[in-house]
Structures are given as C-alpha cells and as structure tokens.
Image (spheres, grey):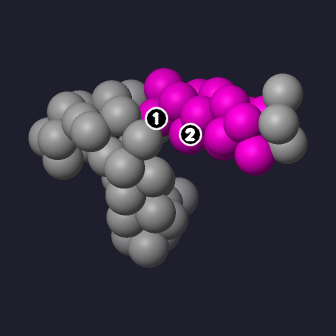
Amino acid sequence: MTYAADRIEEEVAYLAYHFHWGLDDILDLEHADRRAYVGRTATLVERVEAGR
C-alpha cells in the first residue's frame, strides 16, 4: 500500500507551519510518528481556537 503524495504534502505543510521544522526533518519521521504529531498538534490548535 502506498501513502498518497497529497496527504504527505498536507502533513508536511501542517507540521512545518506549526513547528517551523524543515522538510528533511519532517520526512525523516516514521509515518506513525508524523501522523501522531499531526494529531496532537491538531488537538492543541482546536483547544486554542475554542478558547481553552
């Protein structure tokens, strides 16, 4: 199974925007780790937007 290139681009953009990490650093993450960072970051963003 392959992972869609557009999905990887979304993850990279999201993490780069929030953490200011470079492309190589983000792509060096294991898939599961990258998805975990995306999920945790999304949770934090949602909390901030909700005023918590």
**Residue drawn at (53%, 30%) of the image:** 37
Q: Residue 30 magenta-drawn?
A: no
Q: Is residue 32 above or below residue 3?
A: above
> Which amino acid is tagged 1?
Arg
Q: Percent x, y for residue 21?
A: 24, 36
Is 34 on the left or on the right of 28, as rendered? right
Q: Percent x, y for residue 9?
A: 37, 64
**Residue drawn at (75%, 46%) of the image:** 49
> Which amino acid is tagged 2?
Val
**Res 37 seen here:** yes
For mark 2, what is the residue? 38
* Label disc, if present, on residue 34 of the rendered structure: 1
Q: Percent x, y for residue 19?
A: 35, 34
Secondary structure under badge 2?
helix
**Res 35 seen here:** no
Q: Label 1 vs label 2: CA separation? A: 6 Å
Q: Percent x, y for residue 39?
A: 66, 36
Crowding near the residue tagged with mark 2, few <14, some 14–19, many ≥20 C-alpha atoms within 10 Å: some
Task: Name the magenta segment's main secondary structure.
Answer: helix
Q: Are marks 1 and 2 in contact (CB under 8 Å)?
A: yes
Crowding near the residue tagged with mark 1, few <14, some 14–19, many ≥20 C-alpha atoms within 10 Å: some
Secondary structure under badge 1?
helix
Residue at the far bottom: name it: 6
- Label 1 or label 2, whichever lies nearer to me, is 2
Q: Which residues are magenta?
A: 33-49
* The C terminus sits in image quarter: top right
